[in-house]
Amino acid sequence: MVMHLAMRPVRKTLFYFLVIVFALCVIFPFIWMVLASLKTQVQMMDMTKLFAFRPTIANYRQVFGEYSFVRPLINSLIIAVGSTLFGLCLGLPAAYSIARFRLYRLGSLLLVTRIIPGLTFLVPWYILFARLGLIDTFASLILSHLLLGLPLIAWIMIPYFEALPAELEDSGRVDGCNNYQTFWYIVLPLGGPGIFTAVVLAFIYSWNNFMFALALSGYRTKTLTVAIFNFVEYAEINWGGLMAAAVLITVPVIAISLLLQRYVVQGLTAGALKG
């Protein structure tokens, strides 16, 4: 007993040491990226000036001036919001139907589309959209992002809807609500935390998507993840501009994750217990 009590401070110290080491390994690449975005090309290649350097915002001016990142920023926002909204319109009724009517085969089908690598669907999507004349349109990008965003929303909400007491829906039907009114006025308000979680994760997925945007976008619908290729040239790589663009892509996602992580965790765990 005495030995166990004596080892407790050692274990606690070791635990916090490992947490700090792991946190540094995760955070350091982002810190380096931010610092590199404030350096010139020469300073970036000099490892002796990792922290001691004179900051400059020339890279950010170049991003918004020479490379015109405003339009790709707007495109990414339109596609992310559009795919998230359409995913909610389709995913929420699908999740509710699977949960209430035990349509587990449909749920398994959604899970399969979530497991299969997105690269598998790239060529069929490209051929289909090319024949429909939808290449370089927001419609093709939003629909392609739905391919994985929709199953994500459904599988977040299925256990949440299963955890809601059926008696609440029965009381609504007693008051004269049909199935659609019960779903809209009773189920959806109670599923708020889960819906919020699904919205955040689906938006982040769409915002970070690169593969579909690379194949299906063009000059009019180029997203941030594709526009970053402008900094990679045949003879050299503009590392300063590349890091500044990477910061602009990463900061919104990190900000959303940090500010809303408590609600996301609540939404993910809300459907873990039934009854």
Image (cartoon, grey):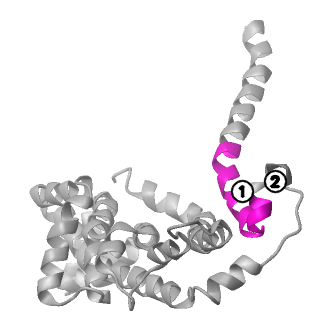
**Cβ–Cβ under 8 Å for marks 2 and 1:** yes
SS under mark 2: loop
Residue 50: which disc?
A: 2
Dominant secondary structure of the magenta stretch? helix
What is the three-letter code of the residue carrying label 1? Trp
> What secondary structure is marked by label 1?
helix
Q: Identify the residue at horizontal 73%, vertical 66% (top origin).
A: 41
Decide whether residue 38 is among the magenta residues: yes
Q: In which quarter of the image is residue 257?
A: bottom right
Question: Which quarter of the picture shows residue 215?
Answer: bottom left
Inspect the magenta stretch and tell me whether residue 75 lies in it.
no
Q: In which quarter of the image is residue 216?
A: bottom left
Front-most of residues 248 and 158: 248
Q: Within 10 angstroms of label 1, few (less than 14), some, or many (20 or more) residues?
A: some
Residue at mark 1: 32
Question: What amino acid type is highlighted by mark number 2?
Answer: Leu
Q: Residue 130: x, y in percent?
A: 16, 83
| Identity of the residue drawn at 20% across and 80% down | 174
From which residue to which does the magenta span run?
23-44
Coordinates of residue 245 in the picture (x, y in percent): 60, 74
Q: Which of 219 and 266 is in front in this view?
A: 219
